[in-house]
Image (spheres, rainbow, N blue to C red):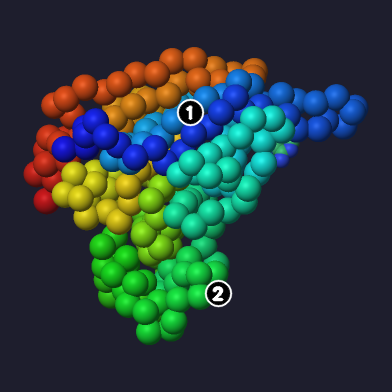
Amino acid sequence: MNTLNHQEILIQVKDCKQAYPKENHSELVVLDDVNVTLKSGEIVGLLGRSGSGKSTLLRIISGLLTPTQGEVRWKDKLLSGPAEGIAMVFQSFALFPWLTVQDNVQLGLEAKGVHKKEREELAEDAIDLIGLGGYEKAYPKELSGGMRQRVGLARALVVHPDLLLMDEPFSALDVLTAENLRTDLIELWVEKKLPVKSILMVTHSIEEAVLMCDRILIFSSNPGRVAHEINVTFPHPRNRESVAFRQLVD
Ligand code: ADP
Ligand code: MG
């Protein structure tokens, strides 16, 4: 079960504000007074209108963007840039078209200085885990959207990140493809096969959030901040939905 009391605190976003400069020397305050804590063992959803600052918050938590005010603590240390242990999956996959599946996935390891042999083995494992075994040598343009996003997932999972950030990971996919990938992810999570401790995902779908997440943060707009927080109680829908959907499609 993912409901242990003594969960490790992974991320603490404290009183964060993010303002972007505008052309007329004023600023656009996108996030204000944002406080979020993420613990190991949970999947947390982030829901909110377009433009409410969800992607901005994910960039801040990934260390790609330093907030205008406030701080982010990653395992109780101040986050000051991209950190080992945090990986991201993008809505638009963000694959390199000139690289094979294998090489796209291995990219996640290159910055870490892992040796070639180990890189290959880790990539192989991530590719198999996410259901792309046999496609190692394929190029992104030869794959369907769903498979491309699996590559994006494998590239994030290959480093065994403690925290997986996903920014609308299914929204570029058609309904059935999205459902399939979602179900696979839920199954891997429930069976504890995903090499991650916690997931934070942005989604537009309330249904998806309820199906996947232990907690749902609902963002208000102008500026974005956590306006509501919902706990999804047990028995968690993902434990049965994944099985039910499998029976439908298999
Ligand atoms: P969401 O992911 O919830 O749709 P975003 O975080 O992408 O929201 O964007 C929030 C607001 O900040 C939007 O109005 C967007 O236009 C603006 N914005 C995002 N990134 C930048 C940037 N780099 N410079 C200026 N404005 C930005
Ligand atoms: Mg966004």
Tag 2, which secondary structure?
A: loop
Is 220 rendered above or below residue 128?
above
Residue type, label 1: Val
Q: In the rendering, at what x and y percent does residue 221 appear?
A: 59, 19
- The residue that mark 2 highlights is 98
Identify which residue, 42 or 236, lies in the foreground: 42
The verdict on label 2 being within 8 Å of ligand 2 is no
Q: Quadrant of residue 237?
A: top left
Q: What residue does disc 1 label?
A: 36
3 w.r.t. 192: above or below: above
Across and down, in percent, residue 47 comes to: 45, 26
Q: Which image quarter has ligand 1?
A: top right
Residue sitting at 33 percent across and 27 percent down?
215
Residue sitting at x 89%, y 28%: 25
Locate residue 156 relative to residue 77 in the image: left or right.
left
Q: Earlier in the sequence, mark 1 or mark 2?
A: 1
Question: Helix or strand or loop: what does disc 1 sit on?
Answer: strand
At label 2, the amino acid type is Trp
Quadrant of the image occupied by residue 158:
bottom left
Name which residue lies at 48% across and 41% down.
Answer: 76
Q: Where, by quadrant of the figure, is residue 98 drawn?
A: bottom right
* Local crowd size for mark 1, using a 10 Å CA cut-off: few (<14), some (14–19), many (≥20): some
Residue drawn at x 85%, y 24% is 26
Of the residues tagged 1 and 2, which is closer to the observer?
Answer: 1
Could you tell me residue 168's position as x and y percent? Answer: 46, 40
Residue 243, image x and y in percent?
Answer: 11, 41
**Which quadrant, please, contains the N terminus?**
top left
Drawn side of residue 116 relative to residue 43, left or right? right
